[in-house]
């Protein structure tokens, strides 16, 4: 589970989601989030849907990188 808490001049936002892999840098900041997909036939519409969700995780968590990794040989898609 990915729990994110952000504060700004307008208030505070707390969010959560499920990501399969979260990599942290040396300062314990979220550097990359990977979302593995199994049993899924990846088409453009589905990739765009997953990208939107993963992009939200990236923005809220401050991750530099986000990756969709379908369990299809040879495919990793940068969000």
Image (tube, rainbow, N blue to C red):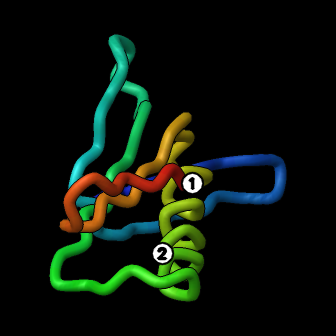
Percent position (x, y) of residue 72?
22, 67
Give the camera-side residue of 74 and 15: 74
Percent position (x, y) of residue 43?
47, 84
Q: Secondary structure at mark 1?
A: helix
The residue that appears at 33% across and 56% down in the rendered structure is: 75
Give the camera-side residue of 68 and 18: 68
- Numbered disc in front, either 2 or 1: 2
What is the quadrant of residue 1 in the picture? bottom left
Residue 6: tell me if it is visible.
yes
Give the camera-side residue of 29 and 33: 33
Left or right position of 2 against 59 = left
Q: Secondary structure at mark 2?
A: helix
Mark 1 burial class by Cα count in 10 Å: few <14, some 14-19, many 20+: some
Mark 2 burial class by Cα count in 10 Å: few <14, some 14-19, many 20+: some
State the separation of the CA atoms marked 2 and 1: 16 Å
Closer to the N terminus: mark 2 or mark 1? 2
Give the camera-side residue of 9 and 60: 60
Q: Which mark is residue 12?
A: none
Residue 5: tell me if it is visible.
no
Q: Extreme right residue here?
A: 9
Left or right position of 9 against 59 = right
The residue that appears at 26% across and 84% down in the rendered structure is: 40
- Judging by the rendered image, the residue that carries numbered circle 1 is 60
- Judging by the rendered image, the residue that carries numbered circle 2 is 50
Q: Is residue 49 above or below residue 61?
A: below
């Amino acid at each position: 589970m990915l729990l994110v808490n952000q504060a700004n001049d307008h208030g505070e936002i707390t969010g959560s989601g499920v990501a399969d892999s979260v990599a942290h840098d040396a300062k314990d900041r979220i550097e990359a989030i990977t979302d593995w997909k199994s049993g899924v036939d990846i088409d453009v519409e589905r990739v765009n849907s997953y990208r939107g969700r993963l992009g939200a995780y990236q923005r809220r968590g401050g991750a530099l990188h986000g990756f969709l990794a379908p369990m299809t040989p040879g495919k990793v898609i940068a969000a």
